[in-house]
Image: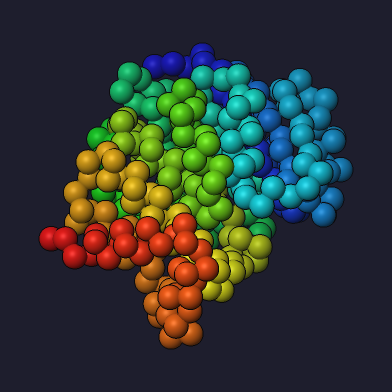
Amino acid sequence: MENRALISVIVPNYNHSQFLKERIESILNQTYQNLEIILLDDCSNDDSHKILKEYSSHEKVSHMLINPVNSGSPFKQWVKGIKLAKGEFVWIAESDDSASSFFIERLITKFHQGVDMVFSPASLINRKGEVIKKPRFFEQYTEVEGKIFIHDHLIGKNDIVTGSSVIFRKEVVLDQLEMLSNFRYSGDLYLWISILSRSNVNILSSSEIFYRIHDHNQTAKNDFSTQMTKINEAYKIIEFLLKRDYKYNQVKAVAIFKIRKLFRSKHNYLKIPRYFVENRSLYKWKLGFSSLMKRD
């Protein structure tokens, strides 16, 4: 039990001014108070800057940084925050989510040698903060072998619906930051897999986090270029898993899950050959996937 450790709370924000004050207050109201808060804004064009400046001089806020130009990826903000973090543990507190006042206290007590990540199932809330769906609880689990959790809850699906659900040990991700910054859509999945490929995970039997469903986070591009970017990211995850000696039949699930939507559209299907010609760096993905799907 490491309940006196410093927790670095990273709040990456982009155009969430309507939820930002509630989010920051939910951090300041934590019963566990040995924490620093790192406020990061990715060039928002709403009132976020005004709200962030209100908290910039708070004793718990160690950094408040506003990007002059949008970075193009939320995970570049994660990486920036992790590099600034002074704590032994990191919590990525997404700016549109919220948490119970016991979130840190209940998660931090679950860390010990061999556990580098602790996870709380998330309740879904609406714009007003009303619970609209309770999470699937993992009552049969407390501590789970990392590779089992990857297989049962991350490959082919992602049962960690928000990065806000997790606290992790900072030192175990430092060698993954360069790769993480290259992701646009699936960086959270990559990070959880990279941690759990060499560590166990502890799971709370209670929900201490609230994942907000609203128009902004439910409106996602579904064009061909976006889908191909997601597939390319899936291939990066596949490569990582194969380097960790995962079996081919397990890794297939990742590939199938990520390309399923793309092949539903005949319009997208016809674009694929030209896309690989124009993006030769991805040609290895085509070859690698074909080889992967032929294996038993």
Quadrant containing the N terminus is top left
Residue situated in front as seen by the camera: 220 or 291: 291
Q: Residue at x 45, y 68 (%)?
A: 276
Q: Position of residue 35 (x, y in %)?
A: 62, 22
Image quadrant where residue 27 sits: top right
Residue 34 against residue 223 in the figure, above or below: above
Name of the residue lying farthest toward the left: 296
Identify the image quadrant of residue 98: top right
* Left or right side of 245 for 59: right
Inspect this view and state whether residue 280 appears: yes
* Extreme residue in the bottom direction: 266
Using the image as rendered, state which of residue 252 and residue 276 is in the foreground: 276
Instruction: Identify the residue at image location x=38%, y=59%.
Output: 285
| In this view, 128 is above or below 1 | below
Asked whether residue 208 appears in the rendered view, the answer is no
Figure colour scheme: rainbow
Q: Position of residue 226 (x, y in %)?
A: 55, 66
In the displayed structure, would residue 113 be above or below residue 26?
Answer: above
Q: Residue at x 59, y 67 (%)?
A: 220
Q: How many marks?
A: 0
Q: Image height check: is 90 above or below 217?
A: above
Residue 36 point in image, percent of width and height: 65, 23
Q: Position of residue 179 (x, y in %)?
A: 49, 40
In the image, taking residue 27 as reference, residue 70 lies left or right, namely: right
Locate the C terminus by quadrant.
Answer: bottom left
Residue located at (56% from left, 74% from top): 223
